[in-house]
């Protein structure tokens, strides 16, 4: 394929390599080379590539109906929503095409609930440093990362940001005009940081005391990635509203906003909508994916692979103490915080045919398909060892 990206808006800078197909946790490039994929479309391809259940569901639906819009009932939507409700804290579900749209729905819903309860002044959001919630105007304001806000006009009113650990600052920041608090239980983009379970429990209590909503962004850390269906389950608490996407479609674009009756009370016919959200193809794939990841042995497997990976990463930290400062994350969303820019390590890993990502705070990000086995964990760690060795040797020279 000719490397001509001149007609593409230049907001991404991918390497030249072109992948043509995938099998399990591997991607195969045009030149026939096989690459072990430890980033999985950024924590999306939970079932790896060419998973027969997902592919079969998509093909079968493609022969029936692709798209109807929400003007008409979509049986797959009703069934998948019932499944999400049965497997979570939620009472109702709104389907979207992406994580960002699930976040938008969450923010709108929180304001509308207060408005409908006679508190239109309750419209403020408290977000946290190191967060990522997507790229819409609402989402960049909710996360407050100056890098993503710059040049896009004044920050929207109603959004404040706090350091994640400081309970007193959080309590002090809540006013009679606060609507909700929004946070990722495991921060992805910001540096693969698993927030302490105690802290999440404290947030739940603070929100209850203040009568505000707790919104969890589980777009990256949900869908089984941490070894529980949702990352907040580790803390033994539930949110009022939750955004999910990425892994729930395992590569088919879809997301959802889940909520309790109380948090969704303001939403009625006409309050919100989406042309494509809950599309028949997405629902067919979403159902197949949910059926896979809710099998108890599936999550047990994720936990098993996660503890192997976690231990091996500790080994890398011990072998390269000058390069690897810290291992981070939870489940199969892991990070190595490095003493240097992670990009050269990412490139060195690619030379070893291992695909990894980067995240904030100089973190190398690992988010493999959840179906990886012990051999793939070992292979990935060996390749990372080689890549770190290359970088260490270059630095010593
Ligand atoms: C990726 C991501 C989003 C945005 O999802 P898109 O599907 O890219 O719109 C929001 N929140 C988190 C935590 C994410 O990782």
Image (cartoon, rainbow, N blue to C red):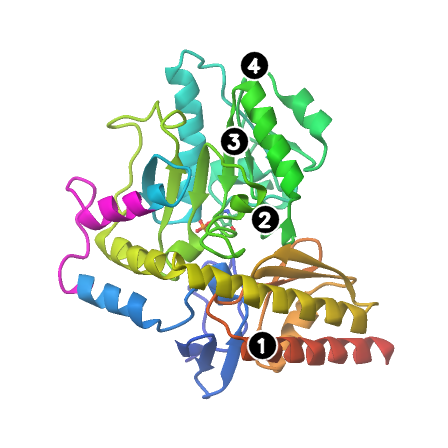
Q: Is 320 placed left or right of 49 in the picture?
A: right
User: In the rendered image, which residue does mark 4 sit on?
Assistant: 176
Residue at the spot 64% in from the left edge and 45% down from the top edge = 195
Q: Is residue 78 within the magenta segment?
A: yes
4 vs 2, front mark: 2
Q: Name the residue under label 3.
A: 214
Residue identified by numbered label 2? 186
Residue 219: image x %, image y %?
47, 49
Which comes sooner in the sequence, label 1 or label 4?
4
Precedes in sequence: disc 4 or disc 2: 4
> Outermost residue, top direction?
118
Which tag is nearer the camera, tag 1 or tag 3? 3
Q: What stretch is highlighted in magenta?
A: 62-83
Residue 15 - label: none
Farthest residue to the right: give it.
Answer: 396
Is residue 309 left or right of 109 when viewed as pictured?
right
Mark-to-mark CA distance, 1 and 2: 24 Å
Can residue 197 be seen in the rendering of this structure?
Answer: yes
Q: Which of marks 4 and 3 is nearer the N terminus?
A: 4
Query: Which residue is label 1 attached to?
Result: 354
User: Quick one: 294 or 145, which is closer to the camera?
Assistant: 294
SS class, disc 1: strand
Dot in front, 1 or 2: 2
């Amino acid at each position: 394929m000719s490397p001509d990206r001149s007609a593409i808006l230049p907001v991404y800078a991918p390497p030249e390599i072109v992948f043509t197909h995938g099998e399990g946790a591997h991607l195969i490039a045009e030149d026939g080379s096989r690459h072990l994929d430890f980033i999985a479309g950024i924590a999306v391809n939970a079932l790896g590539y060419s998973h027969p259940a997902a592919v079969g569901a998509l093909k079968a639906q493609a022969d029936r109906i692709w798209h109807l819009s929400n003007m008409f009932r979509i049986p797959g939507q009703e069934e998948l929503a019932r499944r999400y409700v049965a497997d979570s804290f939620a009472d109702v579900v709104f389907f979207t095409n992406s994580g960002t749209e699930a976040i938008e729905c969450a923010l709108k819903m929180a304001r509308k609930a207060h408005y409908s309860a006679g508190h239109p002044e309750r419209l403020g959001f408290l977000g946290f440093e190191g967060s990522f919630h997507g790229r819409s105007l609402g989402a960049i304001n909710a996360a407050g990362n100056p890098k993503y806000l710059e040049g896009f006009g004044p920050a929207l009113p109603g959004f404040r940001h706090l350091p994640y650990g400081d309970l007193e600052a959080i309590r002090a920041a809540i006013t009679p005009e606060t609507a909700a608090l929004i946070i990722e239980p495991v921060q992805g983009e910001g540096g693969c940081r698993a927030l302490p379970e105690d802290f999440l429990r404290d947030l739940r209590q603070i929100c209850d005391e203040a009568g505000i909503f707790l919104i969890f962004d589980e777009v990256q850390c949900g869908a089984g990635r941490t070894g529980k269906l949702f990352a907040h389950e580790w803390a033994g608490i539930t949110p009022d509203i939750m955004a999910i996407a990425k892994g729930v479609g395992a590569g088919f674009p879809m997301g959802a906003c889940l909520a309790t009756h109380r948090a969704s009370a303001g939403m009625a016919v006409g309050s919100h909508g989406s042309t494509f959200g809950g599309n028949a193809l997405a629902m067919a794939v979403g159902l197949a994916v949910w059926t896979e990841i809710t099998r108890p042995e599936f999550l047990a497997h994720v936990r098993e692979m996660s503890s192997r990976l976690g231990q091996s990463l500790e080994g890398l930290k011990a072998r390269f103490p000058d390069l690897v400062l810290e291992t981070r994350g939870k489940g199969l969303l892991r990070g190595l915080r490095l003493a240097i820019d992670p990009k050269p390590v990412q490139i060195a890993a690619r030379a070893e045919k291992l695909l990894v990502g980067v995240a904030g705070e100089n973190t190398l990000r690992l988010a493999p398909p959840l179906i990886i086995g012990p051999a793939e964990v070992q292979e990935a760690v060996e390749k990372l060892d080689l890549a770190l060795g290359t970088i260490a040797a270059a630095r010593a020279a």
